[in-house]
Image: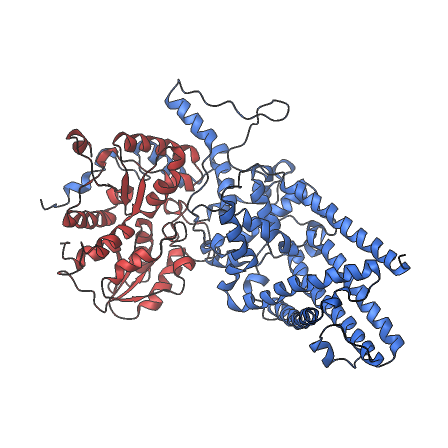
Amino acid sequence: MAEMAANGEEPEILFWVGCAGAFDDRYKRVTRAFVQILEHVGIKYAVLGTEESCTGDPAKRAGNEFLFQMQALTNIEVLNGYNIKKIVTACPHCFNTLKNEYPDLGGNYEVIHHSTYLQQLINEGKVRVAKGESFQGRRITFHDSCYLGRANDIYEAPRDVLAALDADLVEMKRSRANGLCCGAGGAQMFKEPEPGKKDVNIERTEEALAVLGTGDSVIATACPFCMVMMTDGVKNKEQEEKVKVFDIAELIAQAEGLSR
Amino acid sequence: MFKIESIIFIIIAGLGIGLFIWQIRKIRKNILMGRDTDLVDNPSERINKTLLVAFGQQKMFKRMLPAVLHLFVYVGFLVINIEVIEILIDGVFGTHRAFGFLGGLYSALMFINEILAALVIVACVMFLWRRNVTKVPRLASGVEMRAWPKMDANTILVIEIVLMLALFTFNIAGLKLVQLEGGEVAGSYPISQMFVNIFGSNPESLHVIERAGWWFHIIGILAFMNYLPSSKHFHIIMAFPNVYYSKLLPKGKFTTNPAITHEIKAMLDPSYQPPAPETDADGNPIVQRFGAKDVEDLTWKQLMDAYTCTECGRCTSVCPANITGKLLSPRKIIMDTRDRVEEKGESPVIFDPAKYGKDAGTERVKTTEEERTLLRGYITPEELWACTTCNACTESCPVNIDQVSTIMDLRRYLVLEESAAPASLNAMFTNIENNGAPWAFSPSDRFNWAEELYVPK
């Protein structure tokens, strides 16, 4: 972004990578897939690179309002400094925080989650979901992220994106507004679960496995934390050979023949 | 001009209504213990929501069987109340079926009334069955479902059945009397017609039965009304304002504390002048805790939530933490809030849940006197830290209670005032402070992913 600004250019969109997208080895692959899609459609985009910092979401959900606002005010200064208007992010937690909580602190942007953005690209015909791996008939179930679904009422965009794959889409028993959390929200990602009889991600994975049948199948996610939790759940159930966990951007990139 | 019967009626009704108003004032005072919050924006959207969710029972229909049964009782309550107005008029003026002049409309009203009254009985019997025989888990189990909440629910259902039976008693006896006299029946009574002969055909005893049923019904209603403020059944009133004042913003948007914003801005820029703090009536600045330790730190809407809760347990039954055996139960958070409000403020008139049944005097959490606040005295940190803020509870609540906001405010107190977060979360805070990421990675490595990426130019 700094480079673009130095050249006096303004991007159409700012891709907010997020901490998981920048540091988590598994989720870097999602960042890569999404960037490949952005390159593929030829949109003028930018990233903040090292100038990006945590949105403060985990601090806020853990009750540390002070740290959250420190992060938010610093990020807003950077974003406003570059005159950013439109932000796309693959993380529902960043999305929710940037979209809903930054305006109170002086950060007003059009914030779009990558599921909605991919839906737009498919609808506009910019991504045709061809030339790549075929998912025809593969059984896929979408796991709703709480911060995308209930928190922001986005249920259909990721499903529309998956529908373009012509796969065998199945719904879990609890889906959309009734979807069950993966167990990582509210800063649970960064702590051990409280004592109980089961971990939430195991409960959710069992539910997914129940509808996925016996063939090769996919649990599709649209959130870095859900991805970790579902992947761990599948491993715990020793189903990782058969059941893969992918972000919707990875599936689209694969179907478009972009990913290596 | 008034008959002695009318005078007795006026005294009883006056006492009943007066006592009810006195109790409502206590509850109003309790709710206003909460902090102020501005919820008057968007009246049209709020009215829409109230019509859909409260009047229209929209969210009840996520579960079909209880929704239909509840609808019987709810519509029965609304329509039968029209007859209660008639009873009040009859009672005061000594008239008999004062709305009879409405003719066909009255017939239709009485007809619907009887059908609904029968459906109310059916529904209440099934509700009793679900609670006590099949023991639907969300109604029958959970630490918060102590002796009083269970007794309360059964009491309500039994009272409703008895009230409906009283209604039928005076309808049947009245109908038989008119038929014996060969007069014209005001209204149409399909159910009573079926049982018209059960009280025999002695006009004198029929008259006594008719009057007894009538008096029992109206005194029963007045008594039940005064039971409401002590009961979960208070939701029949509170559901409407509570939905009206419910959150219109996306569920993911949590509140921002402007006091903290001023503090940070002053820290970053020494020339920043924060606005003068708000003052109370005597001009002393109001010092507010960060987050909530006790009920007065919550907003009045959060306290209103507590008075609206009907303890149905839908929130708890969809809570991922509760489903997987953690201590957290969103219903308990709300019930605890109500119990604490009544411990600290005005206590209920009819019953004090704390003094009832085998749980009387047993505290849920053992604490010292000064720790007897909502946080720790009722709700433990372990419960609060189990929440994933997934909003399944708020989504499921038929009366738009916001459990997450109360959980969050209690968490904020733990972190901001006590620095009492779990160690792993403190580590996460430190990482964000130092590295700008919740994990221990160097901020200078943040862009490394791009080097690993082959970007075709």
- Image position of A58 with respect to B160: above or below: above
Q: Which colour is chain A painted?
A: red
Residue B79 on image: x %, y %: 66, 64
* Residue occupying the far top of the picture: B271
* Residue occupying the far left of the picture: B457
Residue B309 on image: x %, y %: 59, 53
Question: Residue at (30%, 70%) from the top-left corner?
Answer: A213
Residue B383 visible: no
Please tell me how many numbered marks the rendered image carries.
0
A6 left or right of A139 in image: left
B336 left or right of A148 in image: right
**Front-lying residue, B217 or A185:** B217
- Image position of A116 with respect to B265: above or below: below
Tell me the quarter of the picture where residue B299 sits: top right
**Front-lying residue, A88 or B362:** A88
Q: Which colour is chain B painted?
A: blue
**Front-lying residue, B261 or B236:** B236
Question: Residue at (71%, 56%) from the top-left corner?
Answer: B357
Tell me the quarter of the picture where residue B107 sits: bottom right
Tell me the quarter of the picture where residue B167 sits: bottom right
Quadrant position of the C terminus of chain B in the picture: top left
Residue B448 on image: x %, y %: 19, 39
Residue A237 visible: yes
A149 left or right of A38 in image: right
Question: Residue at (30%, 33%) from the top-left corner?
Answer: B435
Quadrant position of the N terminus of chain B in the picture: bottom right
A191 left or right of B36 in image: left
Residue B306 on image: x %, y %: 59, 48
